[in-house]
Every structure is written in structure tokens, then in C-alpha cells.
Image (spheres, rainbow, N blue to C red):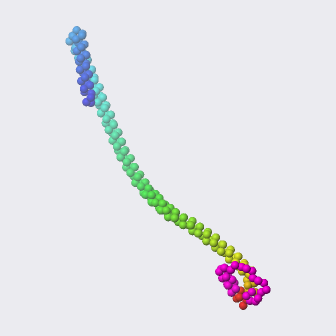
Amino acid sequence: MATLKPVLEQQQSQMLRVKNSGLISINGSPVMEDREEEMTRSALSAFRAKEEEIERKTMEVKEKVQAQLGRVEEETKRLAEIREELHALADPMRKEVAIVRKRIDIVNKDLKPLGLTCQKKEKEYKEALDAFNEKNREKTQLLTKLMETLPNLVCYLTQPCSRPLPHIPITKTLCHIIVEELDMYCWILS
């Protein structure tokens, strides 16, 4: 609106110049001056009417824009409230998920050393089982040899035998087994 007034004044001064220049060139009659003055006034009043109409429409548009902005602000506030409500609903779920994840991490940390210990124990068990099986086989072989030589040994110990004893390497384990077997054999005989 402030920019329209200087433009209006410039246009009025231009019209007066045109009017003055036309009067001088055409005989300078006063009737012509009156007509031109009326035309200028009517043009000026028409221009002012259009200017007022533009200002009125501008104000209407501004009011409409302000109304739209007011609605937009209300909707923005409403969306912000809805967003806060959604975050409030999602927060407990996030907390629960975070707690479950922490528990899973703790269990995984505990399981890793337990898994290693379990593998170590399995290896030790297999080694012990293999050693047990080996000793059991050795015992079976020794018992077999003992059973083969026992009758000869009993014969040799109880009465002189005509056959010599075979050469068998005697270990502490074999001695213990022989003594136990002799005790059992003697018990059976008695």
C-alpha cells in the first residue's frame, strides 16, 4: 500500500504534463482544458477505485491466508501431541526390548566359557575312557596269561613239576593279580 501512493503520484504528475503539453500545442482553448481535466479526474477516480479494490482483495487474501495459517498451526500442534503419544506408547516396548537384549548378551557371555569348559571336559572324558579301555584290555590279557600259567604255577608250588615254567615278565600289577588269584584258588581247593 505504501508503494502504491508514490506510483499514483508519479502517474498523476505524468498526466498533468501530458495535459499541459497538449493544451499548448492545440490552440489553448479553455473548453478543451475542462474536458481534459474531467477526463483526467475520471481516469484518476477510476484508478483510485481500482486501487481500492486491489487493496480490498489483498486484505481478503491476507485474511484467508491468516485463517489457513491458524488452521495449519492447530493441526501442527495436534500432530505433535499425537507424535508424543506414540512415543510414549513405544517407549515401554523399547525399554523391554533393551532389557531382553541385555539379558541375552549376559547369557551369551556366560554360555561361551561354559561351552569351552564343556568341550574341555568332553575331551578329558574321552581321554580317560580311552585310558580305561586300554587298562581293561591290558588286564584281560594279563588274566588270560595268568590263567594259562596258573595251573603250572600251582603245580610248581605244591609239588615238583617235570615241566619248566615259561618266562613271563612279572610286573607289580601282575604280582598283585597272581597273589589274588592264588588266594582265590587256594580257597577253592580248601
Q: Position of residue 148 (x, y in %)?
A: 74, 80
Find residue 125 and report its image quarter.
bottom right
User: Does residue 134 belong to the magenta stretch?
Assistant: no
Residue 132 as seen in the image, left or right of residue 7 = right
Q: Please name the residue shown 52% across and 63% down the image.
A: 112
Could you tell me if residue 100 is visible in this image? no
- Quadrant, the C terminus: bottom right
86 or 134: nearer the viewer: 134
Q: Quadrant of residue 47?
A: top left
Give the image location of residue 163, x and y in percent: 78, 84
> Taking 118 as reference, is 68 above or below it?
above
Question: In which quadrant of the rendered image does the N terminus lie?
Answer: top left
Q: Residue furthest left?
A: 30
Where is residue 34? Give x, y as percent: 22, 15
- Does the magenta-highlighted stretch encompass residue 181? yes
The answer to which quarter of the image holds residue 26 is top left
Q: How many marks?
A: 0
Can residue 186 be seen?
A: yes
Q: Nearer the viewer, residue 95 or 153?
A: 153
> Is 116 rendered above or below residue 62?
below
86 or 98, which lies in front? Answer: 98
Farthest residue in the right direction?
162
159 with respect to 109 (left or right): right
Magenta range: 156-183
Q: 102 or 5, which lies in front?
A: 102
For image coordinates 68% across by 80% down, the residue present is 170
